């Protein structure tokens, strides 16, 4: 039983026994101080309160994950999460099992399996290779997608396990510790430039000729010019932006602070919409495909946003989710806690 359920149970018995309304006290927002352990003993670990995700209450939007019609369900050992779409496959990381798995789009079968120490911070496809940040190896692994063999390893420590990597302007880009955007030349596999970023800016995306980096600690979206290698715009967005995608002329940030999605028009650099999705908290992901924005989060594994209205069109609640990509006409949903990847048609009722 979770801490939340225990509080509810104890509070309910107290109310029945004494007839006194103690609920406001039981659910006070001021946390009690953790007990101080005796000298020489390890500190007591206190589980953080469970994040409540309300989802969207709009009539006709809510659906159950049990109603999803899958095109395929593929097993991926461990904790399938990050994905990248290539010309013939979807590659999925599984940090718990220390490998990256190729899913063949034509057959819905597992292909190559590449061993990587705690793959993290996303995946990128470019220059005939798969680029894999390794939190275990404190490096970036360059892999040949036809053989699964490592062809280069660049020693650079990913800034965050929930950071990111992207490809564009003839280079590979990744944020390293503490918050530095490095530029890797694929011809030499060497870092050729380093751009200092505000703290907690860790997720890059290349689109429309620029790099866009979400700044989790500063509630901002940064625009970086690859030609000058400088930040050319700083755009306020929703609280705690982490993951981002591009589509319909915009960059979309999934804001972990309040579960909204900010839409930033790339031409003007202006926030033109804030979409309430009710999916706050750590984890999750966002992608664009079939004319829609698709977001995932625990409790609500799939949220579809219509760019024409800037509103949630459909939202599915239930178990699953945490990683998402669009490719080959399908949504690929990584269910980290279930060890599966679902291939889903975007035309769901």
Image: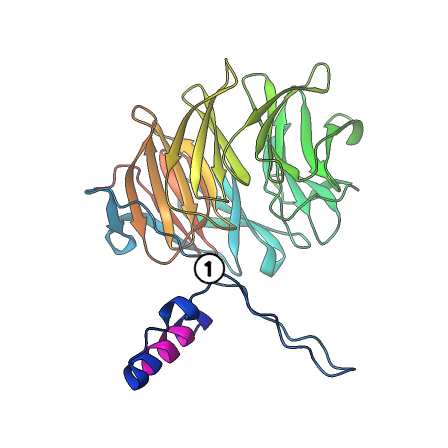
Q: Quadrant of the C terminus?
A: top left
Identify whether 168 is placed above or below 324. above
Residue occupying the point 51% across, 34% down: 244
Q: Which residues are magenta?
A: 6-13
Identify whether 291 is placed above or below 177. above
Q: Nearer the viewer, residue 182 or 47?
A: 47
Give residue 198's position: percent from left, percent from top. Answer: 70, 33
Give residue 194's position: percent from left, percent from top. Answer: 78, 28
Residue occupying the point 67% across, 43% down: 133
Q: Secondary structure at mark 1?
A: loop
Q: Nearer the viewer, residue 214 or 193?
A: 214
Give residue 149's position: percent from left, percent from top. Answer: 68, 44
Q: Is residue 61 visible?
A: yes
Q: Residues within 10 Å of mark 1 (few under 14, many from 20)?
A: some
Q: Quadrant of the N terminus?
A: bottom left
Q: Is residue 300 left or right of residue 45?
A: left
Q: Nearer the viewer, residue 212 or 118?
A: 212
Task: Name the image quarter holding residue 292.
Answer: top left
Question: Looking at this rendering, what residue extends furthest in the bottom direction?
Answer: 17
- Please tell me whether residue 12 belongs to the stretch shown in magenta: yes
| Predominant secondary structure, magenta span | helix
Q: Is residue 85 visible?
A: no
Give residue 21's position: percent from left, percent from top. Answer: 32, 73
- Please tell me whether residue 167 belongs to the stretch shown in magenta: no
Question: Looking at this rendering, what residue extends furthest in the front direction?
Answer: 20
- Identify the residue under disc 1: 339
Task: Name the image quarter holding residue 118.
Answer: bottom right
Q: Nearer the viewer, residue 173 or 126?
A: 173
């Amino acid at each position: 039983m979770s801490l939340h359920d225990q509080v509810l149970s104890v509070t309910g018995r107290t109310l029945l026994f004494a007839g006194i309304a103690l609920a406001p006290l039981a659910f006070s927002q001021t946390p009690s101080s953790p007990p101080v352990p005796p000298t020489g003993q390890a500190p007591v670990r206190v589980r953080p309160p469970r994040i409540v995700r309300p989802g969207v209450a709009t009539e006709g939007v809510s659906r159950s994950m049990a109603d999803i019609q899958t095109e395929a369900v593929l097993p991926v050992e461990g904790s399938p999460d990050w994905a990248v779409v290539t010309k013939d496959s979807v590659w999925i990381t599984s940090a718990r099992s220390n490998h990256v798995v190729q899913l063949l789009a034509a057959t819905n079968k597992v292909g190559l399996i590449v061993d990587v120490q705690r793959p993290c911070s996303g995946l990128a496809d470019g220059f005939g290779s798969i680029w894999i940040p390794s939190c275990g190896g404190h490096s970036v692994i360059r892999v040949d997608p036809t053989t699964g063999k490592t062809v280069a390893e660049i020693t650079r420590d990913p800034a965050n396990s929930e950071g990111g990597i992207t490809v564009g302007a003839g280079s590979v880009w990744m944020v390293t510790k503490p918050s530095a955007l490095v530029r890797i030349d694929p011809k030499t596999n060497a870092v050729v430039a380093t751009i200092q970023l505000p703290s907690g800016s860790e997720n890059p995306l290349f689109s429309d000729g620029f790099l866009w980096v979400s700044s989790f600690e500063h509630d901002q979206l940064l625009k970086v010019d690859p030609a000058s290698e400088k930040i050319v715009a700083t755009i306020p967005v929703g609280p705690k932006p982490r993951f981002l995608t591009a589509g319909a002329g915009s960059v979309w940030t999934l804001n972990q602070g309040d579960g909204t999605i900010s839409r930033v028009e790339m031409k003007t650099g202006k926030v033109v919409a804030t979409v309430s999705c009710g999916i706050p908290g750590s984890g999750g992901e966002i992608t664009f495909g079939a004319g829609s924005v698709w977001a995932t989060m625990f409790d609500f594994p799939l949220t579809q946003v219509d760019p024409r209205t800037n509103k949630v069109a459909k939202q599915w609640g239930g178990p699953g989710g945490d990683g998402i990509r669009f490719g080959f006409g399908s949504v690929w949903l990584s269910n980290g806690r279930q060890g599966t990847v679902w291939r889903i048609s975007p035309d769901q009722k």
